[in-house]
Image (tube, helix red, strand yellow):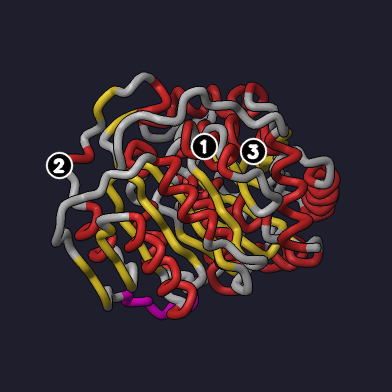
């Protein structure tokens, strides 16, 4: 059994001091240590945790995710379509519930058999963390060297690996909505391209723009390709979690997250996490056309969803319904002046720019130049 605090201090010595995760009984003492002594973000699900940690990595942090192996299935999308193409390395700890030969709950049986093969299939390096301190310390050195090569590394954690670490009392952050404006007039319904032009025109030397996957990123690329832009190419639904991680560690930057209705619906729990941690330097813009525009125009369920009320209930300080492009410009300027977590909702027209190019810069090149912008 490893002394958890000693292990955690070695992690910190190697530079790993930002954590995000979802609880598992096998990892509870490591999670307690992270909450007690490091920067820890409790994610709504494991995929969001990966995206949050990845955003923190972009901002210069060496990041760690913690999860149960059942949750590894929830993290597959960002691991294969965010971390892999962008070459974003994170250190992971995943429990081995359902290990062969050890009595466990029936829902873990299959997952216990496929955990390590899943990691291999996703090009994630892994090892089972030793209970011996000397060997575990050497494994940490190995993991760190793999991370330096821009490859994710996961420790597989057996039951009883970590010694008890008591959780200290933690203050609860009760976030409240201060401003909420509702629909009052007809919607202008601009094109997405027009909305992106308005957003992009207001950026300055401290602004980072993160565009969700599909045609939103492609259209922003056509509006202007810039080193402070990131065009998500996969991991649908993870854009605001990526923005949360980045905003928390780079509070001197203005982080603009440009989302779509299909994307946000896929991981709507991220709104609760964003509201709880409430970075003042983050602006979350939802462009809603009630359509999966990038895959042929299928209708989403967004007409039945009141995003204004949901974001307000989740603790976003300011939530505004935006009716037209001039109002969009005004609300963005207000956010820059007021510096508070803000959600802007705007209905846009269906359809996209035609023809529409794809970025000719590779995702890992987008990441690298963004890191220079952020950390140079």
The structure residue drawn at horizontal position 51% and vertical position 70%, both measured from the top left corner, is 281
* Circle number at residue 304: 2
Residue underneath mark 1: 219
Task: Tell me the mark number nearer the camera, choosing from 3 and 1.
Answer: 1
Q: 185 and 293: which one is in front?
A: 185
Give the answer, above or below, for where 70 lies relative to 27. above
Horizontal arrangement in the rendering, residue 328 relative to residue 84 (left or right) = left
Question: Which residue is at a point 16% across and 59% down the rendered structure image?
Answer: 183
Percent position of residue 199, x then y? 48, 55
Magenta span of residues: 167-175
Q: Position of residue 210 (x, y in %)?
A: 55, 50
Image quarter of the N terminus: bottom right
Tell me the CA gap for discs 3 and 2: 33 Å
Give the labeled residue for mark 3.
83
Where does the C terminus fall, quadrant-wise?
bottom right
Crowd around label 2: few <14 · some 14–19 · many ≥20 (10 Å): few
Task: Tell me the element at label 2.
Answer: helix
Visible residue check, residue 239: yes
**Mark closer to the chain start, 3 or 2:** 3
Q: Residue at x 43, y 70 (%)?
A: 278
Which is more toward the observer, 310 or 283?
283
Q: Secondary structure at mark 1?
A: helix
Which residue is rendered at x = 47% and y = 77% of the image? 339
Magenta: main secondary structure: loop
Mark 3 to mark 1: distance in Å?
Answer: 22 Å
């Amino acid at each position: 059994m490893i002394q958890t605090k000693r292990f955690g201090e070695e992690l910190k010595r190697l530079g790993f001091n930002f954590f995000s995760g979802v609880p598992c009984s096998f990892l509870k003492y490591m999670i307690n240590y992270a909450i007690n002594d490091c920067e820890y973000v409790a994610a709504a699900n494991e995929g969001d945790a990966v995206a949050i940690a990845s955003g923190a990595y972009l901002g210069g942090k060496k990041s760690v995710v913690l999860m149960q192996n059942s949750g590894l299935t929830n993290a597959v999308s960002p691991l294969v379509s965010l971390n892999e193409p962008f070459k974003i390395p994170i250190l992971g700890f995943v429990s081995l519930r359902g290990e062969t030969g050890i009595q466990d709950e029936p829902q873990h049986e299959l997952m216990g058999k496929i955990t390590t093969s899943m990691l291999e299939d996703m090009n994630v390096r892994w090892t089972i963390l030793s209970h011996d301190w000397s060997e575990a310390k050497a494994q940490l050195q190995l993991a760190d060297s793999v991370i330096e090569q821009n490859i994710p590394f996961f420790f597989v954690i057996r039951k009883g690996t970590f010694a008890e670490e008591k959780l200290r009392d933690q203050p609860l952050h009760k976030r409240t909505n201060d401003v909420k404006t509702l629909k009052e007039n007809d919607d202008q319904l601009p094109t997405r391209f027009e909305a992106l032009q308005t957003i992009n025109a207001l950026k300055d030397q401290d602004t980072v723009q993160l565009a969700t996957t599909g045609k939103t990123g492609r259209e922003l690329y056509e509006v202007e390709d810039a080193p402070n832009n990131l065009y998500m190419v996969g991991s649908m639904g993870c854009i605001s979690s990526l923005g949360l991680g980045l905003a928390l560690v780079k509070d001197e930057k203005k982080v603009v997250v440009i989302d779509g209705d299909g994307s946000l619906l896929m991981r709507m729990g991220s709104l609760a996490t964003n509201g709880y941690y409430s970075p003042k330097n983050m602006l979350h813009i939802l462009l809603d056309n009630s359509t999966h525009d990038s895959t042929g125009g299928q209708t989403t369920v967004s007409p039945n969803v009141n995003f204004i009320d949901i974001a307000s209930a989740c603790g976003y300080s300011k939530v505004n319904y935006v009716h037209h492009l001039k109002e969009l410009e005004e609300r963005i300027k207000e956010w820059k002046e007021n510096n508070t977590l803000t959600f802007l909702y705007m209905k846009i027209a269906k359809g996209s720019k035609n023809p529409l190019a794809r970025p000719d810069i590779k995702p890992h090149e987008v990441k690298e130049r963004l890191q220079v912008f952020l950390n140079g």
